[in-house]
Image (cartoon, grey):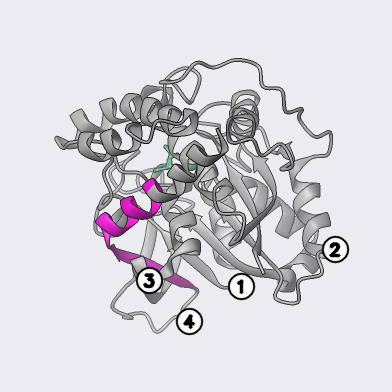
């Protein structure tokens, strides 16, 4: 049976690719809904961009919800300098046909967790700041045992930060929300920069996707070509790390990744290191393991999976 998931995101080109990858695997992932949050760009744009991906994939059976417009405590910081003014520069952006659901994303998450009948519960896949997930945990603690796993893109250990010297963007935008989520007591698997920096979308990999010759693959190639510009300069490498699709790739093919059980905590106070994830990789604190921390990936296998799944859209069009 397909695993029930809610994808909570802030598209963002890499969030968009994560959605398109998930939508291409209906036999494995039952996407119950897409919830959106402010992050890469403001909420009005992230919810629109998620609806555009639903249109593009021909998956209008998937409802899209808007959630929190700002982090719990901090001021919102956005990343147009990476993603462009629309958040998904690199494709033509228009008003989607898929309507926005009237319910708040946090209420959708709560209602779905409480009512879903899968005995194993529902998996949450946040690929943006963790504001919606933390709000749901705070508003309705009865959801906790109904969460099967939280599969997060966020954090950094060996790679250092990408937004500040010590903090990764998603955790830095809402460190207080990350703190709530990391303490929730359910299984968490985390894909931070240590692993996402191992999967750059090189020109050759993008060309292989472009060669699939279907509209979804063309959109992915367009978005990734734009998205690569900033990071290629920043890191001096060919292409940008394809962060968010690591979460979906793990759900589809966990053997691509190596993870290690660790205690992970987030810095919320220090102005210098706010959003830093303290990953106890060597178990020096004796604190309980709350995260499976991804630290290695089969990058070629990851791109084989992504490309093969995007090729499924060729049959549909
Ligand atoms: C994360 O921040 C955003 O720019 C990306 O969408 C990804 O979720 C990487 O730090
Ligand atoms: Ca994201």
| Residue situated in front as seen by the camera: 249 or 26 | 26
Indicate the secondary structure of the residue bearing disc 3.
Answer: helix
Q: Earlier in the sequence, mark 4 or mark 1?
A: 1
Neighbourhood count class around disc 2 (C-alpha, 10 Å): few under 14, some 14–19, many 20 upward: few
Q: Earlier in the sequence, mark 1 or mark 3?
A: 1
Task: Provide residue 200's location: percent of width, then percent of height.
Answer: 26, 44
Tag nearer the camera, 4 or 1: 1
The residue wearing badge 4 is 288
Q: Earlier in the sequence, mark 2 or mark 1?
A: 2
> What range is drawn magenta here?
291-307
The residue wearing badge 3 is 255
| Residue situated in front as seen by the camera: 17 or 185 | 17
The residue at the point 51 percent across, 49 percent down is 175
Instruction: Tell me: residue 142, above or below residue 304.
Output: below
> Is residue 156 something one can see in this rendering?
no
The residue wearing badge 2 is 115
Residue 192 magenta-highlighted: no
Label 1 – label 3 distance at C-alpha: 21 Å
Tag nearer the camera, 3 or 4: 3
Indicate the secondary structure of the residue bearing disc 2.
Answer: helix
Instruction: Tell me: residue 310, above or below residue 147.
Output: above
The residue wearing badge 1 is 186
Neighbourhood count class around disc 4 (C-alpha, 10 Å): few under 14, some 14–19, many 20 upward: few
């Amino acid at each position: 049976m397909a695993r029930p998931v809610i994808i909570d995101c802030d598209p963002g080109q890499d969030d968009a690719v994560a959605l398109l990858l998930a939508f291409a695997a209906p036999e494995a992932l039952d996407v119950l809904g897409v919830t959106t949050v402010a992050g890469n760009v403001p909420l009005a744009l992230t919810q629109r961009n998620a609806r555009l991906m639903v249109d593009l994939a021909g998956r209008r059976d998937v409802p899209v919800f808007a959630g929190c417009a700002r982090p719990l405590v901090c001021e919102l910081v956005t990343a147009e300098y990476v993603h462009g003014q629309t958040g998904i520069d690199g494709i033509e952006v228009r008003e989607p046909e898929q309507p926005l659901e009237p319910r708040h994303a946090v209420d959708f998450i709560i209602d779905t967790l409480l009512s879903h009948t899968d005995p194993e519960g529902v998996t949450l896949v946040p690929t943006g700041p963790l504001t919606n997930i933390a709000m749901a945990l705070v508003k309705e603690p009865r959801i906790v045992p109904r969460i099967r796993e939280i599969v997060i893109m966020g954090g950094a250990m060996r790679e250092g930060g990408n937004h500040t010297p010590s903090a990764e963007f998603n955790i830095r935008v809402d460190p207080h929300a990350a703190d709530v989520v990391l303490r929730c007591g359910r299984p968490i698997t985390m894909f931070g920069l240590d692993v996402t920096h191992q999967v750059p979308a090189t020109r050759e990999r993008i060309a292989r996707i472009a060669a699939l010759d279907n509209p979804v693959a063309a959109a992915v190639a367009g978005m990734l070509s734009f998205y690569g510009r900033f990071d290629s300069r920043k890191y001096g490498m060919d292409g940008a790390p394809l962060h968010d699709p690591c979460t979906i790739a793990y759900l589809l093919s966990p053997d691509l990744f190596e993870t290690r059980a660790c205690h992970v905590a987030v810095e919320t106070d220090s102005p210098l290191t706010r959003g830093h994830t303290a990953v106890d990789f060597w178990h020096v604190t004796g604190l309980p393991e709350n995260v499976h921390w991804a630290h290695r990936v089969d990058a070629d296998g990851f791109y084989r999976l992504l490309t093969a799944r995007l090729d499924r859209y060729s049959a549909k069009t």
